[in-house]
Image: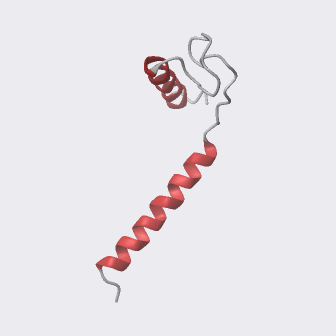
Amino acid sequence: MSDIADRADWRIEKDLQNARAHIGKQAMLDSDGRCHFCDELVAHGRLFCDVDCRDDYDKEQAALRRVGAR
């Protein structure tokens, strides 16, 4: 008979597997010197010019996923 700790370990492992699978489905962005939302120049290694553009990009991508466009 399994106890609470065994069930918790099993649940954690399942959650980790699901998270790893989800990460593998997301496209990775490359830093190309431009903001991925507004196309402004950004410092080397950055993806967005500021937090607002990052958040707007995330919202746009979530909306596209909801309608099945991505």
| Percent of width and height locating residue 65 | 54, 31
Q: How many dots with numbers?
A: 0
- Which residue is depicted at the point 49% across and 25% down? 63
Q: In the depicted view, which residue is nearer to us: 37 or 26?
A: 37
Residue shown at 54% from the left, 25% from the top: 64
Q: Is 55 rendered above or below residue 2?
A: above
Q: Is residue 8 left or right of residue 39?
A: left
Which image quarter: residue 68?
top right
Q: Quick one: which residue is furthest to the bottom in this view?
A: 1
Q: In this view, does 63 lie above or below 10?
A: above
| Residue occupying image coordinates x 55% and y 48% | 22
If the image is split into quadrants, where does the N terminus sit? bottom left
Image spot of residue 53 (x, y percent): 49, 18
Residue depicted at x 66% and y 27%: 31
Image position, residue 57 (x, y; %): 51, 22
Residue sticking out furthest to the front: 43
**Horizontal placement of 35 versus 66: left or right?**
right
Front-most of 61 and 31? 31
Residue 13 lies, with reference to residue 40, above or below; the image says: below
Instruction: Please state which of residues 57 and 60 is positioned toward the viewer in this rendering.
Output: 57
Question: On the rendered image, what quadrant is the C terminus found in?
Answer: top right
